[in-house]
Image: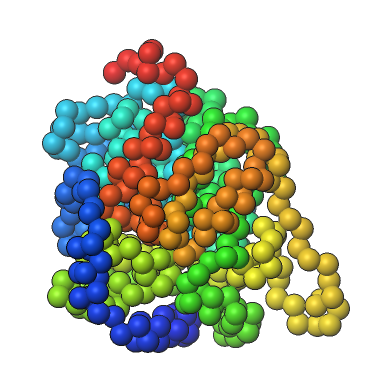
Amino acid sequence: MLLPVLLLMFPMLLSAHYYQYDRRQDSKEENEISVEEDPPFRLQDGDAYLTVPQLVWKYGYEIEIHEVQTEDGYLLDLYRIPGRRAASGQPAQRPYRNAPVFLMHSLLSSCADWVLMGPGRALAYLLADAGYDVWMGNARGTRYSRKHIHLDPDRSREFWNFSWHEIGLYDVPALIDHVLSVTGQPRLHYAGFSQGTMVLFVLLSERPEYNAKLIDMQAISPSVYMYRLEGRIVRTFVQLADPLVAALDAAGRHEILPNNRFIAPLVKIVCPDANVTVCRELLYDVAGKNPPQVDDKMLRIFLGHFPAGASLRQLHHFSQIIRTSRFAKYSPLRTTRSALLAAPAPLYNLTLATIPVVVYYGLNDHVVNFRDALQLADEVPNLAAVHQIADRRFTHSDFILAKNSARLLNSILLQELDQYDGASSANATH
């Protein structure tokens, strides 16, 4: 995997060098902006080395590990937080809400998106504290779902023959069906971040009968339209995607940026407290720049869990929807003249997603520009609400890492869920 990692990281490192980052400028910006703080982080450097189940248990919550098989043979880890233990520092609590909540993560990440910030901040813990039955999915090819009933991810090219289309078509319905089967509930709440939103739109476009299994969708920075993205690193990849993918495919490299046990120690060396230049600048270019919201320890812990792996085709599919401005199916590499003249890939039909959709966006999101998020909001048939994050410099990574995300995002999302959870509060039984 060294070749694709170097190829993908080269423009990132070049970009970091180009910026000539000056921490004094960030200090000046932080002093100019009054930031009302959420509760302090309860994090330790060792969190970078723990798995998600270990993290959840460490911070005092129950954790269940389920393995779900998809129609095409992939084995996915699905984690459930059915309540908190006394070890959380609060009274033990079991879920009492009527419907479970299913959470789906972003590209190159895992369900760590929902727990890394710790209790009092991270969405999964806040939901559990509010009495929700929390389920967190992991897409195929990530560190927690790198399994198949007969294909070996280290030896089989066929294992990696998927994009986010297959995640939406096979992974998401299998995970949803498992949650409903275990809980005995007819429907669930769905919350997704970035890629976690687009895969549900894929599912509802291809299998609209799944609308009946969902109560609502909380779409956090939905990456359906991305053609206005601003990051130079990502734009460089998009421009080079076709020849880069062709070269990597010819070299037999089909897995991109897997989770590696050497990454967290390397990050600790490269990005210590006294100098986080490279780590911050890479984050700022890809996601957007908002220094007051970035905690250095939180960033290093995040980089112990990210990247979590993806397929080459998955990234190629992203490059296609960015380059063409179309939310469309995957087009394999075209080399012959007849292939180049072929009709464009068919669009996904957003009008088939009839569940209530709540959209959350930031004005300084380099990945999902606010105009892209509003374009999606205009096209879904059952738009329930649109929330612009109050911090005008809120970025893509801030949705899961920001110091104030609990107040600026998660508290609002919980209010939205309460509206859709029916009479569960009135009929709640602990």
Q: Is residue 255 above or below residue 376?
A: below
Q: Quadrant of the C terminus?
A: top left
Color theme of the render: rainbow
Q: At 47% across and 20% down in the image, what residue appears?
A: 422
Answer left or right for 56 relative to 240.
left
Which residue ends up furthest to the front in the rendered image? 32
Answer left or right for 90 relative to 3.
left
Could you tell me residue 290's position as x and y percent?
A: 33, 63
Q: At 44% across and 32% down in the image, what residue appears?
A: 416
Could you tell me residue 391's position as x and y percent?
A: 35, 52
Specify the quadrant of the image occupied by residue 414.
top left
Of 188 and 231, the residue lying toward us: 231
Specify the quadrant of the image occupied by residue 39.
top left
Whether residue 230 can be seen here: yes
Of 278 and 92, the residue lying toward us: 278
Could you tell me residue 206's position as x and y percent?
A: 70, 46
Whether residue 198 can be seen here: no
Could you tell me residue 146's position as x and y percent?
A: 46, 60
Specify the quadrant of the image occupied by residue 150.
bottom right
Of 52 and 99, the residue lying toward us: 99
Q: At 71% across and 42% down in the image, what residue appears?
A: 351
How many marks do you count on the picture?
0
Q: At 51% across and 59% down in the image, what residue appears?
A: 368
Q: Quadrant of the N terminus?
A: bottom left
Answer left or right for 21 relative to 169.
left
